[in-house]
Amino acid sequence: MASNSVLKRSDTIADSMPDALKQSRYHMKRCFARFVSKGKRLMKGHNIMEEVEKSIEDKVERSKVLEGMLGYILISTREAAVVPPYVGLAIRPNPGYWEYVQVNSDDLTVEGISALDFLKFKEMIFDENWANDENALEIDFGEIDFLTPRTALPSSIGNGLTFISKFMSSKLTSNSGNARQLLEYLQALYHRGERLMINETVDTVEALQGALIVAEAYVSTQPKDTPFHGFEQRLKEWGFEKGWGDTAERVRETMRTMSEVLQAPDPKKFELIFSWLPTIFNIVIFSPHGYFGQAGVLGLPDTGGQVVYILDQVTALEEELLQRIKQQGLGFKPKILVVTRLIPDAKGTKCNQEMEPIFNTKHSHILRVPFRTEKGVLRQWVSRFDDATAKILEHMDCKPDLIIGNYTDGNLVASLMASKLGITQGTIAHALEKTKYEDSDAKWKEFDPKYHFSCQFTADLISMNATDFIITSTYQEIAGSKDRPGQYESHTAFTMPGLCRVVSGINVFEPKFNIAAPGADQTVYFPYTETQRRFTTFKPAIEELLYNKEDNNEHLGFLADKRKPIIFSMARLDTVKNITGLTEWYGKNKRLRDLVNLVVVAGFFDPSKSKDREEIAEIKKMHALIEEYKLKGQIRWIAAQTDRYRNSELYRHVADTKGAFVQPALYEAFGLTVIEAMNCGLPTFATNQGGPAEIIIDGVSGFHIDPNNGTESSNKIADFFGKCKVDSEYWNRVSNAGLERINECYTWKIYANKVLNMGATYGFWRKMSKEQKLAKQRYIQMLYSLQFRDLVKNIPIPFEEPLPMTTPE
Ligand code: UDP
Ligand code: LCN
């Protein structure tokens, strides 16, 4: 793109577009005439470019027009709402930045319009009466939240913790009233009836500063490893309680840092002190989605990577909490409770058990609460959740310090409970539904009978606004990439004609957004080279799974040449996972077929056993592709697997063959399998659509593949194996670089540290911004009571025989 086409910071598109149109007036008149020629319609970026191609047939002419500012505007246009003679454009020059203009196709005049006007304009296509209804419901979180600071640069999106620490530390410097808030915060730190950090004798900031100087000087005289109780009494006399550290050295460091924060805080010290304060002991995690269990659940409806994520997250958080509590010199036991739904018809899983200890933890449990209606306990799985507050308080014996929600339903419950109990809240979306289906908002009426988007998007809006912080796995989840809006970003401004117009749903520049990527359990997924640790008991089972020549319920197809490396993929058999796509690429690429065998773990083989239309179609397609490309002898199709220890050996076995993992999804929010494969040392090719594009640095720690260009992708895989044949070290280099990338950025240890820091820091932030928080909470309550609760009534509850209202065993 020519340099003169880049907008200056001060320019708006509405300012620059008239001139740009003038320069190509002849062609643009034709283009806009084409846009409006079909009457009212909503066009997407690719439709716009198709129309441009048709109106300017000459390639050279076309590239001239598209070279300059005009090309920049058209390429950045995500959506065009056509209501002849006008065309409203929603333009996104950069992640998070949107501008709206309206162009008159007759005379090419341009007018800058607001998001609100664009939405109304767009509604004219779907529901004119609603668009003109002066009383249409408008939701505008931007207007209610004008005090919260915002980051300015797209590159700062997702770094909320750092930003908020900077902001708070500067507020502490500028206003002694804010230092007082920190003092009051410390004064309120209690756990199980025990006072922590300071007692009532320290009642002013000056008193605290003075006491810190005296105490620090005293503690410095003690040998570094003197345990806290060795000088506890002395510190008490100056107003200090336990929580400062387990040894003289740690206590001194905490006191010094606290003094520095009170005197002239810098953001790093500020973040550090909050990571040391004893603020979090008990955590509640809500995850009612799907079947939440520790065995035999993967593959059941709505049950995928999020269950793996949450169980690993609990283990990591407990470990980090235990370490922090020890370093604080405290003897408390942390408690983590995953609250989910009890499902009496548990399909052979433990989802009908009320309480279950979580493996590999000492103090964490799953608590299952039944869904009830006035008729009794619901037997099957449905997307609703009871108020579980009483049960949680009973189990914990006190209020939790942090509540984390997962997915739409978990996040909503977390928001309600956090607001009710006044507790810090975090949310995790895993994958927001809105971007999965084109025009899921504008065409919500079409989707609602099946997906209940009216309810889901309202619930998502409520929780993303109610929460203190949002944990995301990647940047793209928040603000997408240059060409694709992020999942959260798609909630910035949207409309559901006939229901509500969301003028400002969420602002991706809010400092509540934080990227904390998950990892893979490294006690399970470790490098194939660590032979001593390998689960050798699975060797015969894996040999059978891969190479036995008889088809059965677990595997189909066979590998005639065992010496070839394997390319491996594992996913649910959903269309979006594109396992059939990979099979087809392989089928079509003779060079790749000559170089490697294909092994996929996905779904099962008998379409009559599936209730899901999508899955049935994918199963049939797999069979058809195997026939069409005569793949038997080169493909092994294995049914869905549930044992992650065995799966990890499967990844490692593929690494033994010097093979690779391929994740070909049409779109993947994050992609745990990518992380698992890389942890096992398996070179990985993963989709460039979504999270994996961030996990892997293309050509270094693995490779990106384009799911929409099978030929290019399969050639890229074939090139890799071709290169491995001539350069015997190449495979090892990619394998090692993948492992390095994982250990630098994608471990549960890094994750747990970040999330607990968020819990502590945002816990203080909610106190510092309590007026703004309260105003927003009242607005949210209204939305919940007047809108959400009504919408929920429209969702039919699938009734079988409900159980009577007794608590199940
Ligand atoms: N998985 C599994 N058996 C299967 C398919 C997948 O155990 O047959 C596991 C896989 O190892 C990973 C998770 O399920 O831990 C899938 O998570 P991912 O993020 O890749 O995708 P999701 O299913 O959440 O969309
Ligand atoms: C849901 C998804 O779709 C995956 O991409 C993620 O890896 C998983 O959740 C865990 O966050």
Image (cartoon, helix red, strand yellow):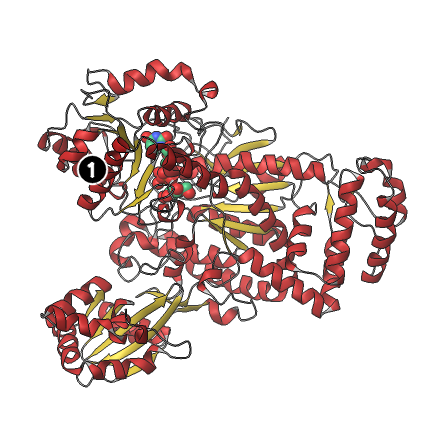
What amino acid type should be assigned to the residue bearing mark 1? Thr
Q: Which sits in the foreground, 247 or 804?
A: 247
Q: Which sits in the foreground, 72 or 196?
A: 72
Residue 801 percent across, percent down from the top left: 36, 33
Local SS, label 1: helix
Q: Residue at x 30, y 16 (%)?
A: 543
Q: Quadrant of ligand 2?
A: top left
Residue 497 percent across, percent down from the top left: 30, 66
Q: Residue at x 19, y 74 (%)?
A: 65
Image quarter hosting the N terminus: bottom left
Q: Would residue 780 appear left or right of 248 to someone viewing this image?
A: left
User: Crowding at label 1, few (<14), some or many (≥20) Cα neighbours within 10 Å?
Assistant: many
Residue 478 percent across, percent down from the top left: 42, 56
Q: Residue at x 63, y 40 (%)?
A: 282
Residue 85 against residue 392 in the figure, above or below: below
Residue topped by disc 1:
580
Q: Would residue 560 appear left or right of 168 to someone viewing this image?
A: left
- Residue 397 at least partly seen: no
Q: Which sits in the foreground, 802 or 732?
A: 732
Q: Which sits in the foreground, 514 or 715?
A: 715
Residue 25: image quadrant is: bottom left
Residue 52 percent across, percent down from the top left: 16, 70
Q: Residue at x 71, y 67 (%)?
A: 173
- Residue 636 at least partly seen: yes
Residue 786 against residue 661 in the figure, above or below: below
Residue 312 against residue 39 in the figure, above or below: above
